[in-house]
Image: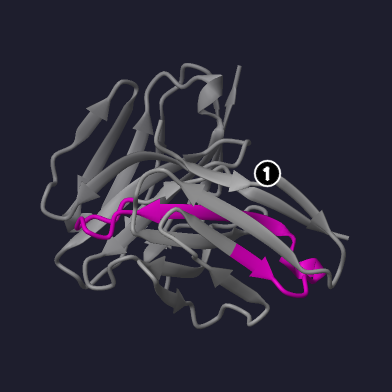
């Protein structure tokens, strides 16, 4: 069974629009960690954020914000006032305390920001 | 800056000709990973080292081997590359002594098999 689901395969927005990338996860662990990574065309996976299961506070970092809701097992990522440089593939990932080093990646969402 | 380095960035090999990809890190992390990523797919874990302990994923083909001679270096050996092995290979590290296992990725090596 897929532990991390990113239902949006591809999204296109016009520059300056806001966009939300969805992530739904599945775990039986009470202690787990959620991550978002950005993969630009160059290929390197760039870490964006980590959230642990005990911290449901939403976080804002510049134009990026994350909405973690345990009730719906979701960890959504919003980019405000999108820019062309935001064009990339974004991966959501889950790490469970039980399995330690195993990362479960979603299938990724390809975001294209049109100038 | 502390980082994960992969060499080469692009590798071309012939069908059946062994190839070695290298990864080094200056983060002093004790866990190192190798992922395979094919076009438009998520990274797929091949194996990882926790210190010197090698952990192979159940579905990783025998054609893929790894070596970790010291904390800083890790190698991926593909003994007889097939056309289906053409992919981006990503190396990552994490500090297994923390609880959250955030992984730091290198820039990847794109392998082409002719």
- Does the segment drawn in magenta span residue A22? no
Position of residue B56 in the picture relative to residue A23 (left or right): right
Q: Quadrant of residue A42?
A: top right
Coordinates of residue A59 in the picture (x, y in percent): 21, 33
Q: In this rendering, is residue B10 above or below B66?
A: above
Coordinates of residue B41 in the picture (x, y in percent): 59, 57
Asked whether residue A3 appears in the rendered view, the answer is no
Asked whether residue A81 appears in the rendered view, the answer is yes
Coordinates of residue A99 in the picture (x, y in percent): 28, 72
Q: In this rendering, is residue A2 above or below B23?
A: below
- Chain ID, mark 1: B
Screen quadrant of the C terminus of chain A = top right
Disc 1 element = loop
Pointer 1 residue: B9
Coordinates of residue A100 in the picture (x, y in percent): 28, 67
Name the outermost residue toward the front. Answer: B70
Q: Quadrant of residue A106?
A: bottom left
Q: In this rendering, is residue B25 above or below B30?
A: above
The total number of labels drawn is 1
Residue span colored magenta: B76-102
Q: In this rendering, is residue A59 above or below B11?
A: above
Position of residue B59 in the picture relative to residue B48 (left or right): right
Screen quadrant of the N terminus of chain A = bottom left
């Amino acid at each position: 069974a897929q532990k991390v689901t990113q239902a949006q395969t591809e999204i296109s927005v016009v520059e300056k629009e806001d966009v939300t990338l969805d992530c739904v996860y599945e775990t039986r662990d009470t202690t787990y960690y959620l991550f978002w990574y950005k993969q630009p065309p160059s290929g390197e996976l760039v870490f964006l954020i980590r959230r642990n299961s005990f911290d449901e506070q939403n976080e804002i970092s510049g134009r990026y914000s994350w909405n973690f809701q345990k009730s719906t097992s979701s960890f959504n990522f919003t980019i405000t006032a999108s820019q062309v440089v935001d064009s990339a593939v974004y991966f959501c990932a889950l790490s469970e305390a039980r399995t330690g080093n195993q990362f479960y990646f979603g299938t990724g969402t390809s975001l294209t920001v049109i100038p | 800056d502390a980082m994960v380095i992969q060499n080469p960035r692009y590798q071309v090999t012939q069908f059946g000709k062994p190839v070695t990809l290298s990864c080094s890190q200056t983060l002093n992390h004790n866990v190192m990973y190798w992922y395979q990523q094919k076009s438009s797919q998520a990274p797929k874990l091949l194996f990882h080292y926790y210190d010197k302990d090698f952990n192979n994923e159940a579905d990783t083909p025998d054609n893929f081997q790894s070596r970790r001679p010291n904390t800083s270096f890790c190698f991926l050996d593909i003994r007889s590359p097939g056309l289906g092995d053409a992919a981006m290979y990503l190396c990552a590290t994490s500090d297994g002594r923390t609880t959250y296992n955030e992984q730091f990725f290198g820039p990847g090596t794109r392998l082409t098999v002719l």
